[in-house]
Image: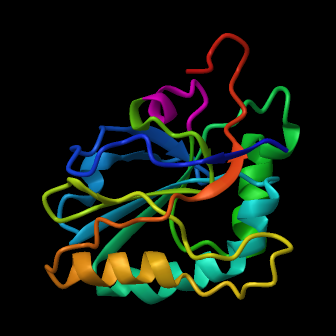
């Protein structure tokens, strides 16, 4: 496990477009969320201990905020050839196991991860109603083994501000997690 931190996309950056297949076989596009008040894009995977550490609370967080106008998508960009636990079939099983209420998308060619400048899992990108980046920070201060409870407080504050039309605090602690598992020759 190689830990990386997020934070490569400047605040105010427009949402990079995407069009990816979800675990149900549907094509999900960034334009599908045009009417939502905010959009949270999460780069995640199945096997990363950082993602597994907060997966249940992440699902609860999404169930709490999606009815309030937050659209959420998870994107797995890991190389499934070298990491079979992150294969498309494994994604289907993981979505069912955890109960994620949001689409879980497969970025097989890793082009969307490149467009976002994603570096780790989990990595959170929150876009406001104008689809400009307002938050790229941590879920909270909890990490595997550090004894800090998983609350989602940092992301919760950002999402609440975005949904109520308030300014999101620009002081953001980067997310930390496993590095994205790039295909050979595909690393940024």
Does residue 149 appear to the left or right of 157 in the view shown? right
Q: Quadrant of the C terminus?
A: top right
Q: How far from the left and from the top, in percent, is residue 142?
A: 69, 76
Picture quadrant of residue 100: bottom right
165 within the magenta span = no
Does residue 1 appear to the left or right of 122 in the view shown? right
Q: How far from the left and from the top, in percent, is residue 84?
A: 86, 38
110 within the magenta span = yes
Does residue 87 appear to the left or right of 57 in the view shown? right
The one nearer the camera, 179 or 5, is 5
* Location of residue 179 with respect to 187 vertically, above or below: below
Picture quadrant of residue 164: bottom left
Residue situated furthest top in the rendering: 185
Residue at image x 80%, y 50%? 90
What's drawn in magenta, residue-wise?
Answer: 107-114
* Location of residue 21 with respect to 131 vertically, above or below: above
* Location of residue 106 with respect to 126 vertically, above or below: above
Does residue 147 appear to the left or right of 137 in the view shown? right
Q: How far from the left and from the top, in percent, is residue 63?
A: 50, 84
Q: How far from the left and from the top, in percent, is residue 61?
A: 52, 83
Residue at image x 46%, y 62%? 137
* Location of residue 95 with respect to 111 vertically, above or below: below
Visual colour scheme? rainbow
Q: Quadrant of the N terminus?
A: top right
């Amino acid at each position: 496990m190689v830990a990386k931190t997020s934070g490569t996309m400047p605040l105010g950056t427009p949402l990079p477009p995407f069009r990816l297949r979800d675990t149900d076989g549907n094509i999900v596009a960034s334009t599908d969320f045009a009417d939502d008040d905010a959009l949270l894009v999460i780069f995640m995977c199945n096997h990363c201990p950082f993602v597994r550490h907060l997966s249940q609370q992440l699902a609860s967080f999404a169930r709490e905020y999606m009815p309030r106008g937050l659209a959420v998508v998870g994107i797995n960009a890991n190389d499934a050839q070298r990491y079979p636990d992150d294969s498309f079939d494994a994604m289907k099983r993981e979505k069912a196991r955890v109960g994620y209420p949001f689409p879980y998308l497969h970025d097989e060619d890793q082009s969307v991860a490149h467009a976002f400048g994603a570096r780790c899992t989990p990595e959170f990108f929150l876009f406001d109603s104008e689809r400009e980046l307002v938050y790229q920070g941590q879920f909270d201060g909890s990490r595997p083994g550090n004894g800090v409870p998983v609350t989602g407080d940092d992301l919760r504050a950002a999402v609440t501000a975005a949904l109520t039309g308030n300014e999101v605090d620009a002081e953001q602690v980067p997310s930390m997690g496993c590095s994205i598992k790039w295909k050979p020759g595909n690393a940024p």
